[in-house]
Amino acid sequence: MAFTVGFDLDMTLLDTRPGIKATYDVLAAETGVRIDSDLAVSRLGPPLLREIAEWFPPERVAAAADRYRELYPVHAVPRAVVLPGALEAVRAVRAQGGRVAVITGKYEPNARLHLAEAELSVDVLVGDLWAETKGAALREHGASVYVGDHLGDIVGARAAGAVAVGVATGPYSAPELAEAGADVVLADLTAFPAWLATYCG
């Protein structure tokens, strides 16, 4: 029977921290606003506007976010690193006859550039979502599993009635992901194909 597995993008499939840090540094230089880019990349997951609002006054947030998204393809996309096991995880879903969906909080056009750069082929991409809103997209596309590194990803999986698979490649440890309600916790995606084989078995 056909099934769909959803994946988060940042710190689940790709380590985007170097490029995001570089983009924030350029934005800070352009605007004259101090941004602690190391701090910003330590808490990836929530929407961009939430992070921008930590550094810019309310009346400047929208324009700063727009400029960040414009800078992103040049400064961030080429610096992303495919995380261990990511390509194999996607291939494992296809080998089991499944579909691959990427449901991410990232601006969708930039997420698409990341997938192309990393040569990650997916069936569905939906961007600009977070926590419960990820759940709506997962339900819409029939995902029975959602894989992510953030507590917000567990919320999204729960909202969709999907199996929540946590990977400890982001800001949260394996015990923290388990305590937050992940059904399965993996150190990284290298363990995903074996888990999926058992799940599909």
Image (cartoon, rainbow, N blue to C red):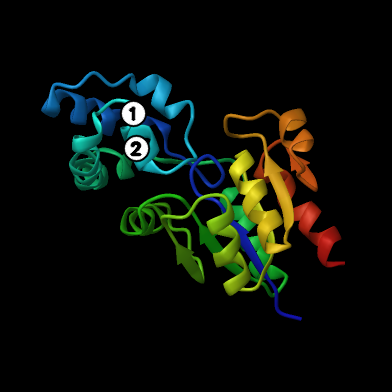
Disc 1 target residue: 21
Q: Is residue 173 above or below residue 160?
A: above
Q: Is residue 103 above or below residue 43?
A: below
Say whether residue 32 is left or right of residue 145. left
Q: Is residue 127 visible?
A: yes
Q: Is residue 2 above or below residue 201?
A: below
Amino acid beneath label 2: Arg
**Mark 2 or mark 1, whichever is nearer to me:** 1
Question: Residue 147, percent across and down?
Answer: 65, 51
Q: Residue shown at 18%/42% (left/top)?
A: 63
- Mark number for residue 194? none
Secondary structure under the numbered disc 1 in the rendered image: helix
Q: Residue shown at 82%/66% (left/top)?
A: 200
Q: Residue shown at 23%/44% (left/top)?
A: 62
Depth order, front residue of 5/78: 5
Question: Residue 124, percent across and down?
Answer: 50, 69
- Quadrant in which residue 188 is drawn: top right
For the residues marked 2 and 1, what is the alpha-carbon distance in whole angstroms?
Answer: 10 Å
Say whether residue 108 is left or right of residue 149. left
Among the two numbered marks 2 and 1 on one chain, the one whose residue lies closer to the N terminus:
1
Secondary structure under the numbered disc 2 in the rendered image: helix
Q: Residues within 10 Å of mark 1 (few under 14, many from 20)?
A: many
Q: Residue shown at 64%/30% (left/top)?
A: 172
Disc 2 target residue: 79
Amino acid beneath label 1: Lys
Q: Quadrant of the N terminus?
A: bottom right
Q: Residues within 10 Å of mark 2 (few under 14, many from 20)?
A: some
Question: Residue 43, percent across and down?
Answer: 49, 29
Say whether residue 11 is left or right of residue 51. right
